[in-house]
Amino acid sequence: MKILIIAPSWVGDMVMSQSLYITLKKQHPQAELHVMAPAWCCALLERMPEVDKAIVMPLGHGEFKLAERFRLGRQLAAEGYDWAIIQPNSLKSALIPLFAGIKKRTGWKGESRYGLLNDLRSNKRDFPLMVERYNALAYPKTQMKSHQNIPDLPWPALRVDVNNQQSALAELNLDTTRPVLSLCPGAEFGPAKRWPEQYYAEVAQQQIELGRQVWIFGSAKDVPVAEAIRHYLPTHLQQHCHVLAGKTSLHQAIDLMALSTAVVSNDSGLMHIAAALQRPLVGVYGSTSPQYTPPLAEKVAVVHTDIECRPCFKRECPLGHLKCLKELPPQRVIDALTRLAGE
């Protein structure tokens, strides 16, 4: 059997997708699993042993380009896929498997994809977690009445490349003499997910004073926030705070984060990477909710406020006050780290 997966575009969603891939390989051990995803997600696919082949999606997020999708579909037709699973909910994401002539096309109804999908699932509300929705697609429609029917929900587990890890340590002049607290203060989704950098700095200072060092991860967009956190620290402690944002590839970020003794992260792709590495993790939630996309790991503490307007799931605070983040004090995160260390 050959299975084509049209994967999501966000890093966190891509990490959670591994649950589906693990389930498919358990059900069909001899199957070839090919996953089409944006180029920036391919580093993750390479760390998932269940994936036999990663196919780069050349179209950008939001681009329709019907003629290009038709060309890609006809290209993939030569592979002779038996089954396609479409994880995104958009209409356009279902076009390539249709153009590839794949007979069985499975996915959630999404943007009224009647005809594009012929194994259409419509009871999404019966699967509260995103990872449950992904996993349910591996099973027959008649079996999946609700999340309670999923016989097993495997957690993502990314593979670490030790050789790459050592090379990254040397390249970035890092060592693990002090235990590592990793901070992930960015969020591609928007500012309504970003805990204030001053609060991150307070956590960093307390942890450095306990004998840890701090590594700050993120993309090039997160460099100003990362530098601000380091700047807020007393001068004599800044030597123990290393800004890695914008300096690492995703491969390097995965391998270096695996060395963490703890991670503090906004609800972001890096949070899900930390969970998939089974690092002790404090997840900080603002406008979003752990009831939908929780970190999937053993040692996890989730912190959030309980103000009446959250979760709103907005990129920017619609009320302009960001109280869901500003009213979440650093001591809550420090206490959570202490509990995790005790466990």
Image: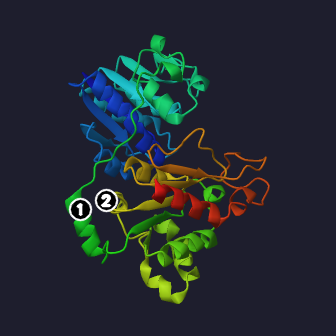
- Expressed as whole percent of the image width and height from the top left, the position of residue 175 reads 30, 74
Residue 155's place in the image compared with 26, above or below, is: below
Q: CA distance from mark 1 to mark 2?
A: 7 Å
SS type, badge 2: helix
Residue denoted by label 2:
255
Residue 178's place in the image compared with 219, above or below, is: below
Label 1 neighbour load within 10 Å: few <14, some 14-19, many 20+: some
- Expressed as whole percent of the image width and height from the top left, the position of residue 39 reads 36, 50
Q: Nearer the viewer, residue 189 or 340?
A: 340
Q: Earlier in the sequence, mark 1 or mark 2?
A: 1
Label 2 neighbour load within 10 Å: few <14, some 14-19, many 20+: many
Q: Nearer the viewer, residue 106 or 144?
A: 144
Judge left or right: residue 7 versus residue 234.
left
Tell me whether circle 1 and circle 2 mark residues in contact (CB < 8 Å). Answer: yes
Residue 117's place in the image compared with 300, above or below, is: above
Judge left or right: residue 256 versus residue 237.
left
Can you see residue 81? Answer: no
- Amino acid type, label 1: Asn
Can you see residue 338? Answer: yes
Which image quarter is the N terminus in? top left
Q: Nearer the viewer, residue 228 or 58?
A: 228
Q: Which mark is residue 164?
A: 1
- Expressed as whole percent of the image width and height from the top left, the position of residue 217 reads 44, 65
SS type, badge 1: helix
As drawn, the residue found furthest toward the bottom would be 236
As drawn, the residue found furthest toward the top would be 142
**Which residue corresponds to the image point at 57% horizontal and 25% vertical from the top-left?**
124
